[in-house]
Image (tube, helix red, strand yellow):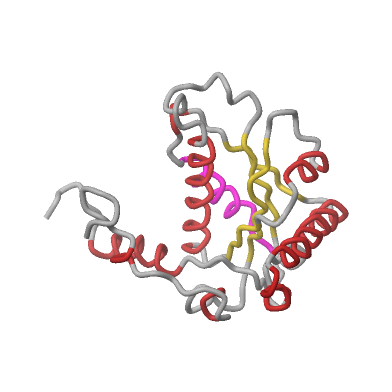
């Protein structure tokens, strides 16, 4: 056995968190204890980042009126997305796609301003700032599952409108509205799969060897 590996129980816990993580849309209110929220945000902050640029910024939403305004932005984009889907419009409108008003904590994750000078790892792949911030979100997601809390990533919003609402500086960019908090239960499978919206593809279809499409 690799001496650097975790114990059997520790490895099982890591893989369980990965397997049982869900994009949650149904929340049961309640609260998140300050010390738990601190642990979750620290887990997010420990994510890897290209060139150690740490491009993530977190905005905790505490004012009810601001939460309501964010919900308004999400609802407006939900309608526009439904219209863009054409024949699936009605089906989409029946889906629950967010829990902004129901979750215990609401966080906005944004990319910082002034990212252009950070060239380490980004000269040919400038979107690695987004990849780095996504790693932070995934860390938070897995830690939340380990703490028994649900989390949902909402991307239905107009970035410029949300940036203005939060008085964000020019050059920064919101990438996620995160709903976080207690849930009555975790979905046994991804909700969009359970609702018949999409079917996950097996890894074997997405894994190639040496060249694209070669299995």
- Nearest the eye: 80 or 95: 80
Q: Which residue lies furthest to the top in this view?
A: 117
Q: Give coordinates of residue 150: x percent, y percent.
A: 58, 66
Q: In which quadrant will I find the C terminus?
A: bottom left
Q: Is the magenta stretch mostly helix, strand or loop?
A: helix
Number of residue marks: 0
Who is closer to the viewer here, 214 or 118? 214
Who's the residue at 79% across and 62% down the image?
Answer: 75
Q: Is 124 located above or below residue 209 in the figure? A: above
Q: Quick check: 156 left or right of 37?
A: right
Query: Residue at (53%, 80%) from the top-left corner?
Result: 194
Quadrant of res 110: top right
Residue 95: give x, y in percent of width and height. Answer: 68, 75
Q: In this view, does 196 lie above or below 129?
A: below
Asked if 78 appears above or below 170 in the picture, the reply is: below
Question: Percent position (x, y) of residue 197?
Answer: 57, 76
Asked whether, in this view, residue 68 is left or right of residue 171, the answer is right
The segment highlighted magenta reads: 31-46
x and y, in percent, of residue 34 in the image: 64, 52
Q: Does the magenta stretch include residue 102?
A: no
Quarter of the figure that contains the N terminus: bottom left
Choose between 94 and 43: the one closer to the eye: 94
Q: Does the magenta stretch include residue 41?
A: yes
Task: Answer left or right for 191 relative to 83.
Answer: left
Q: Quadrant of residue 20?
A: bottom left
């Amino acid at each position: 056995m690799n001496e650097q590996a975790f114990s059997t129980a520790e490895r099982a816990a890591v893989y369980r968190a990965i397997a049982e993580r869900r994009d949650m849309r149904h929340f049961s209110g309640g609260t998140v204890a300050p010390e738990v929220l601190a642990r979750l945000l620290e887990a997010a902050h420990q994510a890897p980042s290209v060139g150690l640029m740490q491009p993530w910024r977190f905005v905790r939403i505490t004012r009810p009126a601001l939460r309501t305004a964010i919900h308004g932005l999400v609802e407006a984009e939900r309608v526009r997305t439904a219209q863009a889907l054409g024949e699936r419009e009605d089906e989409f409108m029946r889906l629950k796609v967010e829990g902004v008003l129901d979750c215990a904590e609401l966080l906005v994750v944004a990319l910082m301003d002034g990212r252009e000078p950070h060239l380490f790892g980004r000269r040919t792949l400038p979107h690695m700032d987004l990849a780095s911030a996504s790693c932070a979100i995934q860390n938070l997601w897995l830690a939340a599952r380990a703490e028994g809390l649900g989390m949902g990533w909402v991307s239905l919003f107009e970035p410029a409108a949300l940036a203005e609402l939060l008085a964000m500086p020019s050059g920064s960019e919101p990438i996620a509205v995160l709903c976080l908090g207690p849930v009555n239960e975790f979905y046994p499978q991804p909700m969009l799969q359970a609702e018949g919206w999409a079917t996950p593809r097996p890894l074997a279809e997405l894994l190639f060897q040496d060249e694209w499409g070669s299995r």
